[in-house]
Image (tube, rainbow, N blue to C red):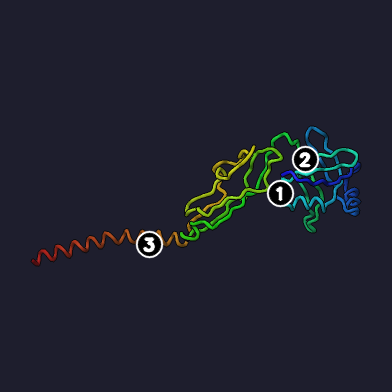
Amino acid sequence: MRKDITIAAEPRATRGKNEARRLRVAMKIPAVVYGTGKDPFAVSVSPKEMNKILHSASGVNTIFNLDITGVENSPVMVVDWQHDPIKNNLLHVDMKRIDLSKRLTVKVPVHTTGDPVGVKQQGGLYEIITREIEIECLPDEIPEHFTVNVGAMMLGQSLRASQVELAGSMKLVSPAEQVISHVIAVRGSAEETAEGEAGAKAAEPEVVKKGKKEEEGAEKKK
């Protein structure tokens, strides 16, 4: 999703650990921007501003403007980043220039709402298998997320990728049969039900046979 956000960046002439330390003292981190047929370009950016992008509702699907002082102002997306494994500080970011006229392939979250009938009335268990699908669309049409109401889902039914409603230029890339969520029987109750049905079936012939013997004995007495 394209946002009206501009993040300032400064050209970075040198690289290496010493340069990274110097940038961090200045409250900056190293970054690289590439794409649209141009050479990769080293820059420095504010980690605070980049974290706002990464933690926003649209996350890495956010298209924003990167204003490199004296060089260019281009729409970009974050494609990779690195955190400190101990402090969890943002250390480095890779960004890709975006051609707004060309289609992109992105992963979009799928949110589900409603209480399935299979849970409320049939005693099933609602289980989420995956929380996103992959689509292809124009950059300006990337949604923050999809929302699907699963209130009518019965026991044994599934929500599949092909059932997510797409709009505009969107095209499904994930397999159409990919299961997003489903309602399944609770294992304990399913086993008890199966045992009960098996026991009932086994008992029925015995009752019938017993009934026939009693009828034959009554006829002999007569």
On-image quarter of the N terminus: top right
Instruction: Judge whether 36 appears above or below 152 on screen.
Output: above
Q: What element carries label 3?
A: helix
Tell me whether circle 1 and circle 3 mark residues in contact (CB < 8 Å).
Answer: no
Q: Going by the image, does 33 lie left or right of 166?
A: right
User: What residue occupies the far top of the structure in this picture?
Assistant: 37
Disc 3 residue type (three-letter): Gly
> Closer to the observer: label 1 or label 2?
1
Where does label 1 land, which residue? 58
Q: Is mark 1 on a helix, strand or loop?
A: loop
Q: Which of marks 1 and 3 is nearer the N terminus?
A: 1
Residue at 26% in and 59% down: 205
Q: Earlier in the sequence, mark 1 or mark 2?
A: 1
Using the numbered discs, state the Cα–Cα distance from disc 1 to disc 3 in whole angstroms: 50 Å
Q: Nearer the viewer, residue 212 or 40?
A: 40
Q: Percent from the top left, x then y, of residue 161?
A: 57, 44
Q: Percent from the top left, x then y, of residue 190?
A: 44, 59
Tell me whether circle 1 and circle 2 mark residues in contact (CB < 8 Å).
Answer: no
Where does label 2 land, which residue? 96
Q: Which mark is residue 196?
A: 3
Crowd class of label 1 (few under 14; some 14 to 19; many from 20; radius 10 Å): some
Q: Quadrant of residue 34?
A: top right
